[in-house]
Image: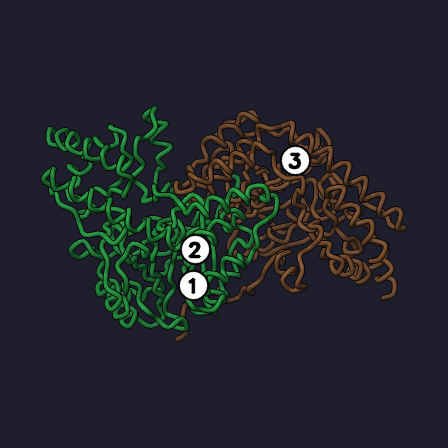
Chain colours: A brown, B green
Amino acid sequence: MSYPRYTKLIDSLPATVPFVGPEAQERERGAVFLARLGANESVFGPSPNAIQAMRDAAAEIWQYGDPTSHALSTALAAYHDIGVDNLVVGEGIDGLLSYIVRMLVGPGDAVVTSDGAYPTFNYHVLGFGGTLHKVPYREDHEDPEALMSKAAEVGAKLVYLANPDNPMGTWHSAETITAALEALPEGCLLVLDEAYIEFAPDGVAPAIDINDPRLIRMRTFSKGYGMAGARVGYAIGQRDLIRSFDKIRNHFGMNRAAQAGALAALKDSDWLDSVRAQVASSRTSIDDIARKNGLSTLPSATNFVAVDCQQDGAFAQRVLMALLEQGLFVRMPFVAPQNRCIRISTGTAENMQLLAKAMSMALQQARRG
Amino acid sequence: MSYPRYTKLIDSLPATVPFVGPEAQERERGAVFLARLGANESVFGPSPNAIQAMRDAAAEIWQYGDPTSHALSTALAAYHDIGVDNLVVGEGIDGLLSYIVRMLVGPGDAVVTSDGAYPTFNYHVLGFGGTLHKVPYREDHEDPEALMSKAAEVGAKLVYLANPDNPMGTWHSAETITAALEALPEGCLLVLDEAYIEFAPDGVAPAIDINDPRLIRMRTFSKGYGMAGARVGYAIGQRDLIRSFDKIRNHFGMNRAAQAGALAALKDSDWLDSVRAQVASSRTSIDDIARKNGLSTLPSATNFVAVDCQQDGAFAQRVLMALLEQGLFVRMPFVAPQNRCIRISTGTAENMQLLAKAMSMALQQARRG
């Protein structure tokens, strides 16, 4: 008999990594990247107050974090004008997605998402034995109508919808999201991933009754708040649903300094505003760089821009590789026809100068084939 | 139809918390604790180098942590003289226990542990639908022979054994652990939780062939290294087993500053030595305080001491409550007859003075009933 006796499900899964980290690529190429524009991290960093709070917390790291993240949860509840029992803080949206999938999805259960949307969600669905049903993007947007009709067709337990979307950066209006929720089939839960909501125009986040049990919203300190490495996300929803996380979550899973940092970050709305302005400015720079190179960009409500290389995925892949060779860490969509684009995170003026220089060379190289 | 459609397993689970955090108790009593001696945290703190590394990393927290924890993993592999593919870094032992249980345990699968041992392990087993079989402690030690014969009897997939033990602080020799491994029934995996190993006498950690697939060892930076709030643990084992974690783990789950802090902590063996000495000294203080109050203590190879209150669980509970009322955060074993004890973490000289003062009052109060 072999050791150990894995579950059948685990035996069937591949050992995989949803994303290869830039550090692994740096080790392979034997040099660090000159610009880190591939993971939609915020190069503008967290609020100085958040940095200070984390520094101050370092000496107290011998203490476990508060398992209820009480101070942060209370502040978030006030910020959103909801009850503290309407949200749960967790180890990033990735961790929270794992929990919500685990709560609902068992072997063979149907889950619906967009083909080319967030792979880590898919990883968790497959990791709990769910069956993924994918609908294509429609004109480079997630397609809420198609998602909902697929969900009805397959009797889905979960539908995943990111607004704004990653990797395309496109978005839907609050009205469209509300309409999607109304079209949600009975017995299905909508996971609305709003990781990039801080970069979206005002009013894109729909006002939805917090007691509506059909919806769970995911938010994060990784993007607008610039704390990707801290691992702080939260889920917002009806209180019974939120309470169910306590059945399975890793109660002592939060880093104590991260809790303190997120609290300070939340309070510094000026910093968030300044990041938004810098992101908007950098999006314009990426647009300019693309246009000067005869390319176009997709409108973005995020901290990244999808640059349309206007040929097929193989061509975009060559552009990507040429940028990587020049020391720019960038990524690209996985699925056609979205994979005609490369996805470039917003960055500093220096990052943009590097990008401008690298882009024309990358295109020359890609066109040589 | 109700929303959402949880799995049957999740529907059957209670919303629970393996441990109530001291912060919740502080909020309830309306005052902070004067001494935090209940969660076996290291009040001596992490190495100053680790604190500095975390402070330095705070400004770079906008970057995700390396999903392979490469620098830390490489250093740990060198430290243990094993391959880097023989270990996986994760979000504390709690997180790693969740992964190993998820990999092996499905509904109805048998798992063996000691009655009164680590409740978070039990929480994960029940959370994945496993059936727990418990054997009693034997003279306040975990009973490897009983664990192994129970495992054979019930066809267990997993056996949990902590050495040194929590909550009693007792330990077995390397020879006893090796003998337990030899007695492990076919098809069963031994989870050896060595969270407190840094406080044990030399030679307590058995030398076991790293290619032995019957064993997985859990280590942590939460105890000896004083970084409980950082959430850094690791599992050591045969490479195929370790690689299986990649099927389900949260690849980007590590806090970046915690990775840097753990690496610095690992390198500062002088600090660890000084913590060991302070812990040993504080254990002696707790022994003295107990003796002066007519109580006895159990020998400990950990950073805490089980103080035998020499009556029943109800009496120990009264002692515990009286200590809590006086501002000392302490805990106690859950199960008779071990719950005749209270469990006190080692602390500073100031902590010990407070304890000395509080203990005689607590006993007077408990004896009044």
Q: At label 1, which amino acid type do we have?
A: Tyr
Seen from the viewer's position, the closer of residues B278 and B5 is B278
Residue A158 rendering spot, x and y as whole percentages? 58, 46
Q: As drawn, is B246 to the left or to the right of B144?
A: right
- Identify the image quadrant of the N terminus of chain A: bottom left
Q: Amino acid at mark 3?
A: Glu
Check residue B79 in the rendering and tell me which mark sits there, or answer none: 1
Q: Chain of mark 2?
A: B
Front residue of A32 and A276: A32
Asked whether disc 1 touches disc 2, contact meaning CB atoms under 8 Å apart, the reply is yes
Nearer to me, A262 or A36: A36
- Which quadrant would residue A236 be assigned to in this image? top right
Expressed as whole percent of the image width and height from the top left, the position of residue A86 reads 51, 32
Q: Are marks 3 and 1 on the same chain?
A: no
Given the image, what chain letter belongs to the residue carrying mark 1?
Answer: B
- The residue carrying pointer 3 sits among few (fewer than 14), some (14 to 19) or many (20 or more) residues within 10 Å by Cα, namely few
Of labels 1 and 2, earlier in sequence is 1
> Which residue does the numbered mark 2 point to in the structure image?
B266
User: Tag 1: Cα neighbours inside 10 Å, few (<14), some, or many (≥20)?
Assistant: few
User: Alpha carbon of mark 1 to alpha carbon of mark 2: how far?
Assistant: 8 Å
